[in-house]
Image (cartoon, coloured by chain):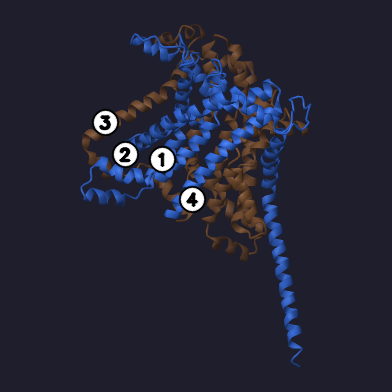
């Protein structure tokens, strides 16, 4: 009965395979069920708005919901010819440069100083990190008051030295710098903590070995601390650039984009076009141009960090 | 190195000044220590001044505050007038309630949804898992601010404008929360769950009664950070809430700011009342907040 065995075996295999298929189907089902709530919210409030915004950017949609007809690339053509788009993109990039440099360097300096291990750790962390937890409304009100031309602390302080300070937020020469200072004060805590954690992950034996070789503290900082912090610096730099490019709250509340649009970032312009000018379609097109910039920065980071990890 | 490993080292590092630091810090000598202490103290003072000035202003009578910084700094008759009048007006209680409700519900839903998805991505083999993971990674790149216009349109279609859900729902899909949870789950040894499975625990029980209790530190960090972000969010509630009774603290404050006119002490008192709950939160959950920030930044 040589022919009887194979059918039996294949029957068992069939049975087994059927069991495996069933189990795989249950596994699939369970995986999707556990992901479902998140994916539903993700689809509704991230994917769908992204696609819907893209669609709107090709239409003449207004805030009243009228005129939803397809206008092709008209909005994009208009955006590229709109001097306000260029000036607000310029403001955004300028703000990003001005704010990113101190937000990375000062954060590094503060983290290194705190990491030396002076007493009162909680106080240092409170001082530098607490502003990060404040709402932009609170921060704006603190600083609008600080910058008040006649009554504020900044000009009063300058007055003690016989200096007449400008109207910081109303003067086109100082408004941008004033908001940058506020932003550095407000958000440095995040970068500070990232650097502090990274510093504390540097193995002590590296420093001990360098000390034995007679390296001074500056030498150790340059040849151990700085290289060891390189991955964190790339991360901090990119997160900071992305955050700075998305600036809105401070300008919206402190300068309103003024004087004369000199401090209007791109997101504020999108807000004005969409909700004050009622042109949602055009606002969406500008959003997508901006979106494109963000993606370029993100991809640049991924390329840099993946090259780094390949090397390592 | 596993995630838990890094986490443990990070915690021991962040929460206490490691005595070993003295070894290489002291190498620079006494002058170096004095110099760095001075710089640090100067920075800390600069950083504290804006908040302290706001507090001092808020404790001055409106009449004194209107005379400027010089008067505010030299006036030593503190009063709680601004605080009591703001709290008596009542609007601020509505705003506190709105902020608290939306922040707590957002945090709870974010925790539940993100941890379930992360559990599936970390523990279950299912068709399309890689695709789901990629999709979520892609979500990291979408700047939520540019979605505000389509989200507004969507909420209008769903007739959710001027409801708490309009503030809550768009903030629930937090990609970063999924990442933090997945990274943590990947570091939990599977033997623990297998033991539970052998004892007859189902998948839900494994997730809810075994994995989640083990993930308490990361759960606390995600919960607190989500709470803070939602509490402080200005753009979304500004767009979707126009009913003054439903406004959250930042929006309510931004809208009344203009009506205060020259009552500078009241303005600063309002700002401080808005900030107070988060300052208290920081005092209680300092470690979780610090860990949450470093964990979300140092992923991968």
Pointer 4 local density, CA inside 10 Å: few below 14, some 14–19, many at least 20: few
Q: Is mark 2 on a helix, strand or loop?
A: loop
Disc 1 versus disc 2: distance between alpha carbons? Answer: 13 Å
> In which quadrant will I find the C terminus of chain A?
bottom left
Image x and y of residue B144, in percent:
62, 35
Kindly identify which residue carries mark 4. A306
Q: To which quarter of the image does residue B70 belong?
A: top left
Pointer 1 local density, CA inside 10 Å: few below 14, some 14–19, many at least 20: many
The reply to whether dot 3 and dot 2 touch (C-beta < 8 Å) is: no
Disc 3 versus disc 2: distance between alpha carbons? Answer: 12 Å
Pointer 2 local density, CA inside 10 Å: few below 14, some 14–19, many at least 20: many
Residue occupying the point 45% across, 56% down: B1
The reply to whether dot 1 and dot 2 touch (C-beta < 8 Å) is: no
B219 lies left or right of B147: left
Q: Do labels 4 and 3 share a chain?
A: no
Q: Which of marks 1 and 2 is nearer the N terminus?
A: 2
Image label count: 4
The reply to whether dot 4 and dot 3 touch (C-beta < 8 Å) is: no
Q: The blue chain is which one?
A: A
Q: Mark 4 lies on which chain?
A: A
Most distant residue in the bottom direction: A1
The reply to whether dot 2 and dot 4 touch (C-beta < 8 Å) is: no
Q: Against B98, is A48 above or below?
A: below
Nearer to us: label 4 or label 3: 4
Nearer to us in this view, B16 or A218: A218
Pointer 3 local density, CA inside 10 Å: few below 14, some 14–19, many at least 20: few
Display colour for chain B? brown
Q: Against B271, is B185 above or below?
A: below
Disc 4 versus disc 3: distance between alpha carbons? Answer: 39 Å
Kindly identify which residue carries mark 1. A195
């Amino acid at each position: 009965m040589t022919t009887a065995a194979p059918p039996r075996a294949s029957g068992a295999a069939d049975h087994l395979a059927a069991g495996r298929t069933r189990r795989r189907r249950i596994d699939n089902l369970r995986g999707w069920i556990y992901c479902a709530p998140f994916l539903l919210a993700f689809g509704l409030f991230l994917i769908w708005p992204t696609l819907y915004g893209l669609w709107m950017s090709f239409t003449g949609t207004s805030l009243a919901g009228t005129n939803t007809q397809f206008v092709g690339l008209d909005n994009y053509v208009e955006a590229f010819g709109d001097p306000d788009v260029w000036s607000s993109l310029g403001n955004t990039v300028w703000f990003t440069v001005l704010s990113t440099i101190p937000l990375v360097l000062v954060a590094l300096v503060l983290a290194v100083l705190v990491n030396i291990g002076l007493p009162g750790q909680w106080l240092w962390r409170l001082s530098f990190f607490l502003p990060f937890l404040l709402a932009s409304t609170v921060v704006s009100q603190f600083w609008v008051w600080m910058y008040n031309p006649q009554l504020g602390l900044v000009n009063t302080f300058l007055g003690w030295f016989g200096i007449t300070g400008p109207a910081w937020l109303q003067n086109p020469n100082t408004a941008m710098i004033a908001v940058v200072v506020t932003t550095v004060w407000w958000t440095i805590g995040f970068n500070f903590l990232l650097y502090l954690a990274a510093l504390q992950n540097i193995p002590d034996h590296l420093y001990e070995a360098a000390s034995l070789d007679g390296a001074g503290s500056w030498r150790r900082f340059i040849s151990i601390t700085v290289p060891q912090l390189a991955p964190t610096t790339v991360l901090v730099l990119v997160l900071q650039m992305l955050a700075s490019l998305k600036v809105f709250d401070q300008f919206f509340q402190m300068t309103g984009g003024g004087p004369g649009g000199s401090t209007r970032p791109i997101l504020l312009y999108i807000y004005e076009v969409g909700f004050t000018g009622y042109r949602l379609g055009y606002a969406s097109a500008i959003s997508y141009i901006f979106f494109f910039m963000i993606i370029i920065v993100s991809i640049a980071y991924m390329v840099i960090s993946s090259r780094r990890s390949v090397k390592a | 190195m596993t995630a838990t490993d890094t986490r443990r080292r990070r915690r021991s590092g962040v929460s206490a000044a490691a005595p070993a630091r003295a070894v290489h810090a002291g190498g620079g000598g006494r002058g170096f220590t004095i110099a760095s202490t001075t710089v640090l103290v100067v920075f800390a003072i600069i950083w504290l001044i804006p908040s302290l000035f706001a507090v001092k202003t808020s404790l001055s009578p409106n009449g004194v505050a209107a005379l400027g910084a010089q008067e505010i700094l030299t006036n030593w008759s503190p009063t709680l007038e601004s605080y009591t009048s703001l709290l008596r007006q009542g609007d601020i209680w509505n705003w506190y309630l709105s902020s608290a409700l939306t922040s707590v519900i957002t945090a709870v839903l974010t925790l539940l949804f993100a941890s379930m998805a992360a559990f599936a991505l970390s523990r279950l083999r299912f068709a399309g898992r890689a695709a789901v993971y990629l999709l979520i990674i892609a979500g990291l790149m979408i700047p939520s601010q540019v979605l505000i216009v389509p989200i507004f349109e969507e909420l209008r279609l769903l007739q959710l404008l001027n409801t708490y859900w309009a503030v809550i729902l768009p903030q629930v899909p937090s990609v970063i929360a999924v990442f933090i949870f997945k990274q943590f789950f990947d570091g939990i040894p599977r033997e623990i769950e297998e033991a539970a499975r052998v004892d007859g625990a189902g998948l839900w029980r494994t997730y809810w009664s075994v994995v989640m209790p083990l993930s308490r530190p990361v759960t606390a960090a995600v919960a607190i950070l989500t709470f803070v972000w939602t509490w402080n969010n200005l753009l979304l509630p500004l767009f979707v809430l126009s009913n003054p009774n439903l406004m959250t603290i930042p929006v309510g404050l931004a809208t009344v700011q203009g009506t205060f006119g020259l009552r500078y002490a009241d303005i600063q008192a309002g700002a401080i009342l808005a900030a107070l709950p988060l300052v208290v939160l920081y005092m209680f959950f300092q470690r979780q907040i610090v860990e949450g920030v470093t964990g979300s930044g140092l992923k991968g």
